[in-house]
Image (cartoon, rainbow, N blue to C red):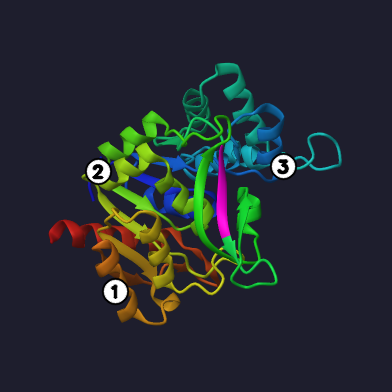
Amino acid sequence: MSADLKAVALGGGHGLQATLGALRRITPDVTAVVTVADDGGSSGRLRRDFGLLPPGDLRKALTALAGDGADDWAGVLEHRFGGTGALAGHAVGNLLIAGLIEVLDDPVLALAKVAELLGLTGRVLPMSLEPLDIEADVEGVDEDPTAMRRIRGQVAVASTPGRVRRIRLHSATRPGEPPSACPEAVQAVRDADVVLLGPGSWFTSVLPHLLVPELHEALVTTSATRLLVLNLVPQPGETTGFSPERHLDVLCEHAPRLRVDAVIADADAVATPDRLRKRAAGGLGATTRLDVVAAPGAGWRHDPESLAKSFRAALAEVRGA
């Protein structure tokens, strides 16, 4: 695999961390494009108090890409304050990112400064330079199982007991206007050799990238090889009862123009491989690759080394076709 392969991974949370850990084994040129709709925990508090981008998923992406010798700094950034005071629950990295954004008035530059501290060869970008809000149409929340209710906020959508049917993305600072993309993120997707979407919380970490118009257009028109990584298990609340094929259906409903070169799934997590292959080919124009990519003893978490091998094989297969 070429050492100068330009890779872009889109997502948020633990799913994006797994993808970045795998990509680090393939190429040093990795860009993470991170969702910025989180409204819970430390990130939500900082967002509400200062009107800044929620820093939590950005921090996780930075530490996932941390270079050799940066383990101490990565540990410091991940440390959370205890106790019951004003800092209780805040991660050091969240405060650092929030402080740099406020001082520099430039989220991209602020993240570059943290990347320099960690010795990153890759970079982390927000998908938008403004905080965003997720809104979902959810069925089955009320007594009438067919009634649709509108749920707003990432935490609320992720924890809803109903069935999410569709999501929308809104600017939190410009009511009524569509979200705007980070220009550097759009350019990174356009310039990439390979773009990865997923795994992660399907409605709150994966699909939001497809709902930012400029980013959506870049994903649809990029000449990069596009790989989609499916989750290992359904996520309680968001995708309870979803089959792997249903994940693809939802993706196609939100981005009907998107085409993908390969869908990667864990062999043990797919009950009907032929059905998944048919759905991937018909809906996304993709081949399907089934590998064992779950971490041993932790079937809900991807193993970065196994995922890296699957990425290499998928890229070789697509480029050799």
Callout 3 amino acid: Arg
Callout 1 amino acid: Arg
Q: Tell me how far mark 1 sits from mark 2, CA to CA.
A: 24 Å
Residue appearing at x 35%, y 65% in the figure: 264
Residue 170 pos. (x, y %): 52, 40
**Which mark is first along the chain, 1 or 3?**
3
Residue appearing at x 65%, y 60% in the figure: 159
| Disc marking residue 222 | 2
Q: Horizontally, is 201 left or right of 211 in the view?
A: right
| Disc marking residue 80 | 3
In the rendered image, which quarter contains the C terminus?
Answer: bottom left
Q: Tell me how far mark 3 sits from mark 1, CA to CA.
A: 43 Å
Range covered by the magenta-colored residues: 132-137
Q: Give SS at disc 2.
A: loop
Callout 2 amino acid: Thr
Report the residue marked by disc 1: 277
Residue appearing at x 40%, y 55% in the figure: 254
Figure check: 117 above or below 276: above
